[in-house]
Image (tube, helix red, strand yellow):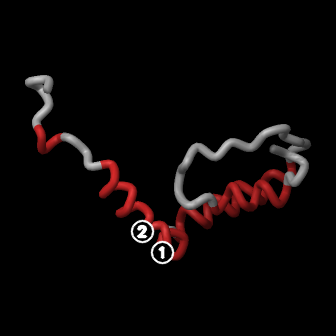
Amino acid sequence: MNALVSEKALVDTYSTQRAFDRAAQRYDEAARLQRDVADRLLGRLSYIDLTPQTILDLGAGTGYPTAKLMQRFAQSN
């Protein structure tokens, strides 16, 4: 092990994933600001002539805006 990395600094990825999974169940309820911003940004898409071929979710949040994008752009991958 590298002398600069202590055992306490190592991340238990399994525990981290479980914590995120538990929090995700309530995330959209608690993330009112994020949801409001996402809804406003999604609403602005009607002003843009846009037909994306692909929609990429980079793993931010629970996928709330991604589901809305997939509904709006059903022909996209």
Secondary structure beneath dot 1 equals: helix
Residue 16, image x and y in percent?
A: 33, 55
**In the shown orientation, is residue 47 left or right of residue 36?**
right
Secondary structure beneath dot 2 equals: helix
**In the shown orientation, is residue 44 left or right of residue 60?**
right
**In the shown orientation, is residue 15 left or right of residue 47?**
left
Circle 2 Cα neighbour tier, 10 Å, few/some/many (<14 / 14–19 / ≥20): few
Q: Are marks 1 and 2 in contact (CB under 8 Å)?
A: yes
Amino acid type of the residue tagged 2 in the rendering: Ala
Task: Identify the residue shown where x is 14% and y is 23%.
Answer: 2
Task: Identify the residue shown where x is 25% and y is 45%.
Answer: 11
Residue 39, image x and y in percent?
A: 69, 63
Amino acid type of the residue tagged 1 in the rendering: Arg
Residue annotated with mark 2 = 23
Quarter of the image where the N terminus is located: top left
On residue 26, which mark appears? 1
